[in-house]
Amino acid sequence: MMKAIKAPRGTRDILPPDTALWNFVEAAVRDVFRAYNFQEIRTPIFESTELFARGVGEETDIVSKEMFTWEDRGRAESDKGQSLTLRPEATAGIVRAYIEHKMWDRGLNKFFCIGPMFRRERPQKGRYRQFYQIDAEVIGPASSGSDLPARDAEILEMLATLLHRLGITHWNLELNSVGSSQERVKFNEALRVALEPVKDKMCVDCQRRAVTNPLRVLDCKVPEDQPIIDKLPRITDFLEDESRKHFDAVQNILTKVGVPFSINTRLVRGLDYYTRTAFEFTHGALGAQNAILGGGRYDGLSEALGGPAAPGIGFAIGEDRLILSLQEKTPAEAVVRRPGVYVAPMAGMNADAAQLARELRRHDLVVELGDENFRLKKSFEAADKAGAKYILIVGENEVKADAFALKNLATGEQVQIGRAELAAWLKARIVP
Ligand code: HAM
């Protein structure tokens, strides 16, 4: 036998019935987002590498180590040599589209997208090389109010509403302000100074970060480094009036609307575009990869990508992780739609059975159709395997009488129902 080919490392197949759970989540997401007036946007899965270098930041782990990048060998001269990258996240692409289509002219400022992202990370539970994000962004000129703290609070409240709707409890919202870019320059400098005498006692990554991007030291997870990190300056001490007021206002609204949060002054996020509000929702049951979503404000991103001033805020939910935390309580079996009825044609009755199945499916019933070549025993087995609730036999007598025998596969109970009442009878007994 030839060697079988497997899915590449860090990718995985999402199979039925789990896909039903994914659809259940996405349907709830669309429903909740609609109530807040977000509209769907679909951007390309690959973009020019420069977009992420400029948007997410050259110094970040994502851009410096984790991108799937290649050089285009396209036929047209203009394509040749262009560096392209599978998107590691959605925000940069959405902001690019916002600028490219002058969305401010169309009054569009709230977007969401659902789709795969790609990062070359070391795979483990909850961490994949192809993973899925549910991403939402509010972006627009300051005149649209996109810079105001009420937007931050609204987004966080929307997330709390979504998690509640999905039945996900035990989450923790960690909130911080990473300040304006000027405030962060000062903070970075203070960190650099504070790290100078202690960095040699830290892990190799931190020794490098202490020089290239001291802020990233706060991300370090190495246990031995934690006592040192705990003594470093805190961003909150570097916030000036405007940023402090903004942060206070966000917290006031959250308290008023009843969204619990905790302040984590070490939360800096792994992307460079953030300003002021930054947040993560963690979930206890997920182990090491416990962030189910992350986001924040990115007031300078549009300008960094060659667009007009357009403050913005958004988040991305790690859909894979959201599903992991959901699976504890809601198994896929609870949301999958099994066939209500298995239509089993007797010999020579395929055409009549097809006609009947067509009628039933028009009434939004899930129907599995057998074949006239199957013996009755095989039809029953197939109906069982498919998880159908009823089996319906289509024979010559039934068609002549315009009435069909329906057998409940679990109880063995059998009833005779006229063709005209069939769909309504089944619908009344099948939970969608
Ligand atoms: P991020 O924190 O890099 O933010 O990713 C958001 C979420 O995506 C994480 O909290 C996690 O749940 C999930 N995630 C990230 N990497 C992986 C992976 N390798 N495997 C599975 N799940 C993963 C962003 O991407 C920003 N674009 C969010 C944002 C939107 N900020 C403003 N707007």
Image (cartoon, rainbow, N blue to C red):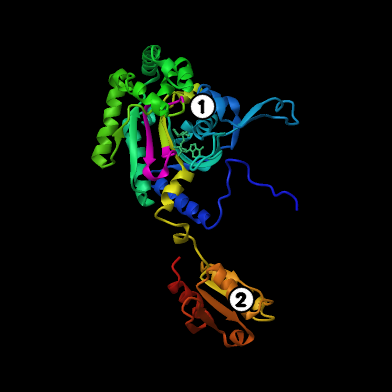
Which quadrant holds the C terminus?
Answer: bottom left
Where, by quadrant of the figure, is residue 268 drawn? top left
Q: Residue at x 28, y 23 (%)?
A: 244
Query: What is the secondary structure assignment of the residue under circle 1?
Result: helix
Amino acid at circle 2: Ser
Circle 2 crowding by C-alpha within 10 Å: few under 14, some 14–19, many from 20: many
Give the residue at mark 1: 61
How many numbered circles are shown?
Answer: 2
Magenta residue check for 282: yes
Specify few, some or many for label 1: CA neighbours under 10 Å numbering under 14, 14-19, or 20 or more.
some
Q: Position of residue 253 (x, y in %)?
A: 26, 36
Q: Which residue is mark 2?
A: 379
Instruction: Compare residues 164 and 222 and report the one nearer the observer.
Output: 222
Kindly identify the amino acid type of the residue bearing the numbered disc 1: Asp
Asked whether disc 1 touches disc 2, contact meaning CB atoms under 8 Å apart, the reply is no
Give the percent coordinates (x, y) of residue 281.
37, 39
Above or below, 347 against 314 in this view is below
Q: Residue at x 54, y 26 (%)?
A: 63
Whether residue 44 appears in magenta in the rendering, the answer is: no
Residue extent of the magenta highlight: 272-293
Q: Is residue 295 left or right of residue 86?
A: left
Query: In terms of image quadrants, where is residue 367?
Result: bottom right
Q: Is residue 138 visible?
A: yes
Which label's residue is closer to the chain start, 1 or 2?
A: 1
Q: Position of residue 180 (x, y in %)?
A: 37, 21
* Front-most of residues 260 and 366: 260
Q: Residue at position x 49%, y 60% from top?
A: 336
In this image, 211 relative to 157: left or right?
right
Does the residue tagged 2 have its C-beta within 8 Å of any atom of ligand 1? no
> Can residue 306 be seen by looking at this rendering?
no
